[in-house]
Amino acid sequence: MVLEIVVTPDCFGCEEASRLAALLRREFPALEVELHILGPGVSVPPGVVATPTYLLDGQPIFLGNPRQAALVTEVGRRLHARR
């Protein structure tokens, strides 16, 4: 599974999104976590209408930063369902 966190260099909350990305990498080593930084010449993934947006296998799961516990629970639930 791939969790893509879409941010911009100057968005409100994108520093927190970077922190959450690092946490998820530690919490779920089997999960590929990508920080997708939008900018000139960078295409916007489908489903992204604001930043930060959290996409799991291309599907939006959170718009804006979720609470840490909610993110860990949701990602863990989806990873477990895949097994």
Image (cartoon, rainbow, N blue to C red):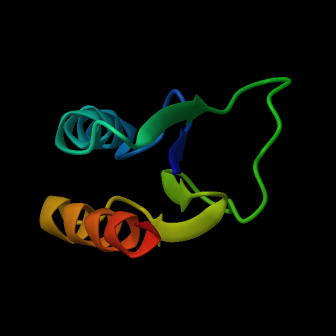
Image x and y of residue 15, in percent: 31, 34
Residue 40, image x, y percentages: 80, 24
Residue 77 placement, left or right of 54 = left
Front-lying residue, 14 or 67? 67
Q: Residue at x 71, y 27 (%)?
A: 39
Who is closer to the viewer here, 80 or 41? 80
| Residue furthest front in the image | 83
Q: Work out which quarter of the rendered image holds the C terminus and state it.
A: bottom left
Query: Taking 10 as reference, is 83 above or below it?
Result: below
Which quarter of the picture shows residue 29? top left
What is the tally of numbered marks visible in this picture? 0
What residue is at 39 percent from the left and 40 percent from the top?
Answer: 14
Q: Residue at x 49, y 31 (%)?
A: 10
Q: In the image, residue 31 lies at what x, y percent?
A: 40, 43
Is residue 28 left or right of 12 when viewed as pictured? left
Tell me what residue is drawn at x 26 percent, y 31 percent. 22
Image height of 25 relative to 75, above or below: above
The x and y percentages for residue 19 are: 24, 35
Residue at the far left in the pictured view: 69
Q: Which one is in front, 22 or 63?
A: 22
- 60 lies above or below 13: below
Horizontal relation, residue 50 to residue 70: left or right = right
**Is residue 80 shown above or below 50?**
below
The image quarter in which residue 30 lies: top left
